[in-house]
Amino acid sequence: MTFKSLVSLTFFFITSIISAQTLKIRVENNSGKAIENATISSGNMVLSKTNSDGQAQIPASKITKGNILITAYNYAETLYSFANIDTQATTVIQLEKEENKLQEIVITAGRKKENISTIPSSVTILNQRDIQNQTNISTNLSSVLGNLVPGLGTTTNKATNAGQTLRGRQVLVLIDGIPQSTPLMNGQRDIRTIDPNAIERIEVIKGATSIYGNGSGGGIINYITKKSPKNDSFHGNTTIGTTFNPIHSSETFGYRLSQFFNGKRDKFSFVAGGSYDYTALQRDAKGKPLGQTDGLSNSDQINLFAKLNYAITDHSSINLLSNFYNSTQHAKYISQTGVYGATPTIGVHGEDPGQNAGTPYNYNLMLSFSKDNLFQNTQLDVAAYLNSFRSMNRYVASASAWYGSGQTMINSDKKGIRINFNTPFSIGNIPTEITYGLDLLNDVTYQDLVDGRVYIPKMDMTNIAPYAQLKLDILENLIFKGGIRYENATVRVKDYNTIATGANGAGSIFVKGGDIPYNATMFNAGLRFNKYEIFNPFISFSQGFAINELGRILRRADENTIDNLETDPIITNNYEIGFSSRISNFNLSAAYYISTSKLGANLVDVGGYLVAQREPETVKGYEVSLDYKLSEQLKLGGSYSFVEGKAKFDDGSKVYLNGSRIAPAKATAFINYKPTEKSSVQVSWVNTGCRNRFEPASNGKYKNSEGPISTVNLLNLSANYAFSSKWSISLGVENLLNNYYYPTVSQYRALDAEYVLGSGMTSSLNLHYNF
């Protein structure tokens, strides 16, 4: 045998031994408990799954580039890199709970992934566990957000989110960055635009911000949709459930069906599914059917969702998102109007003559492209999207705004392109990055009656907005963020006639159309010092831009040309100071803010009509949140938020902003108890305080949205139990003590027809299957 043959034989023998060797893996959580059914993969190949002891064996030869990816249900995906592969010892890998991992990363604040500790503003993140605990109780996203987000008004117990302002100003709602709100004419149905099962997490950025454009004077709510897995696999989630009033159960049984799939094969991955949710008759604590004004009784909610991703290379990918949402009421009851402050409006058997109110459809479609190595490690994200939104208001037999009966629908169609770059570099030894790009948006919004009469003419807005945001570490752990955005918008309105208020066209006036130009430059700047977890302070200034409620101004025009109407935009200035603090298992955050604008948008009652009050406004408030982890089994926490606002007139006098803008103080508290790895229970409390700012008018009645508010206390329960890694059950109880109460919107609106009680005790029972 030659020397060369001997070397070849030896190499083949050693390679065969290595190929036959297996690596022992144990996967556990931070407490050292084994994680069963965790998937271990490398490259695009699944190598093994862990057993009940969290253990698995994988062939060492199949490990690509020394890396393995571990995924498990409810845990963050973890990439583990081997310094050297030891086949003799057991490699222990700990996974972190997904909600803890995601809590640290924010996308919305800077249009890129960044750690929450580097952002100089208040941010609330609702992770998967937060959403699940709340949707066990109610799938109404208005309730979910109202119960959890400091500074956001509590739920209205209706199909609309009227009065759910953020820090006293309008909020811009997004789905993966696609605008859902209709700021040209606010239909107040933008929070309920997607099913919670399609959401991965919710990011709430508070305070004025122009980074996403028109309508974010109070902040942004961005629904981040579910993502597909990173390794080759196929998974599914099935939910079957029912809701009912356990005390007064007649006609209250609703049901819910939800099915979602996600998977990956080579370079292609996807998430797809849908849900159907039927809400039956809602009753108050004494068993009476609730009044049906914009109610949720006998309503259907349908959601169809798909997100497809193709990895072109290791550095670039293309993504397609489609989401269809429908929520309409098929009422079997009509309202029997009560008397404000005396008797509630209740539901009685009957048929509403109008079309089904609600959201006939809200459709989103987005095609996006990402590349992370364009030049000098520049990240490029390009997205083209469309949003088509229809909001049907309830039928009224007699209207004050037009002659006779009628029913209106808000129509909004948006098309947009977003081009975003992020380039890291250094100024001397200072790490720096710049985010810059261009937003293009066309928004066509109008409101007409179903019989063909035009209530609000078409408002055709074209908006071009370049922007740049700079981030740099001035000193070690002292982070500066500042930016600029230029809004260049034009709203085109054709000639129109205001709607008639009497017979034979009486009261209608001709208005000559034209172009309404808007040009404004927005600035923001902030500092955050994040060296110490015990005290992580920030200070910031930011501006927001809004062409707010232009439709209300056009429909109430008393001039013959739009040039004479007061249509100037609202520029909001937000000043804020705050901090976060972590001491062992104790977390605390607090913020104080002042929000000002030279023009206002408070809707006031003038002769029975809601008219925008354009006087300067100042809104002030503060928020405090805390939580404490007593043990692995027990965690508790809560929050408190307070906001107040006033408008200032030319003579120096000031008046309070009404209830449609300023919510009463809100306090929340929760206790999470996890007696075993398979079970958990949460009891939560929501309190809205009292508020009495206005006197009755000369006729003894309160004007619209100026009614006094009394305290409301609600206790909710959420519980989960996992039979296995695949099967689980959840129980939710809303209004656990069956309180008899009026929601804040019923109180401050001061209208007989809307003086509707809140729901009595409502239970939800759901069975879940994951594979």
Image: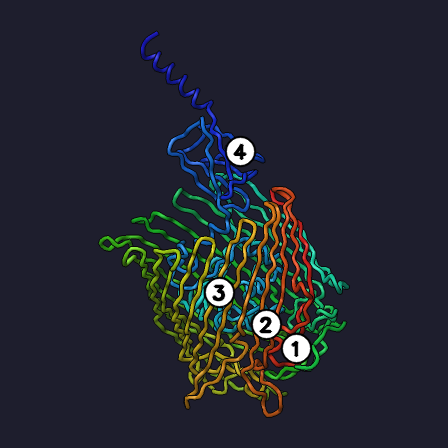
User: Could you tell me which residue is drawn at 30 percent across and 58 percent down?
Assistant: 472
Q: Is residue 608 left or right of residue 204?
A: right
Does 475 sit above or below residue 755?
Answer: above
Q: What secondary structure is marked by label 1?
A: loop
Circle 2/circle 3 CB separation < 8 Å: no
Identify the mark at residue 409; answer none if there is no mark.
Answer: 2
Does 350 sit above or below residue 693?
Answer: above
Q: Is residue 114 left or right of residue 343?
A: left
User: Could you tell me which residue is drawn at 63 percent across and 42 percent down?
Assistant: 724
Instruction: For marks 2 and 1, give the CA distance.
Output: 23 Å
Please report whichever mark, 3 or 4, sits nearer to the chain's N-terminal start.
Answer: 4
Identify the mark at residue 237; answer none if there is no mark.
Answer: none
Badge 3 local density, few (<14 within 10 Å), some, or many (20+)? many
Circle 2/circle 1 CB separation < 8 Å: no
Of badges 4 and 2, nearer the viewer stands 4
Q: Which residue is mark 4?
A: 55
> Where residue 197 sits: x, y (%)?
58, 54
Please report whichever mark, 2 or 1, sits nearer to the chain's N-terminal start.
Answer: 2
User: Could you tell me which residue is drawn at 50 percent across and 77 percent down?
Assistant: 551
Please report whichever mark, 4 or 2, sits nearer to the chain's N-terminal start.
Answer: 4
Q: Residue furthest top?
A: 1
Please report whichever mark, 2 or 3, sits nearer to the chain's N-terminal start.
Answer: 2
Q: Nearer the viewer, residue 474 or 545?
A: 474
Instruction: For marks 3 and 4, give the CA distance.
Output: 51 Å
Which amino acid does the dot numbered 1 rest on? Tyr
Of badges 1 and 3, nearer the viewer stands 1
Q: Which residue is mark 1?
A: 755
Please report whichever mark, 1 or 3, sits nearer to the chain's N-terminal start.
Answer: 3
Q: What secondary structure is marked by label 4?
A: strand
Circle 4/circle 2 CB separation < 8 Å: no
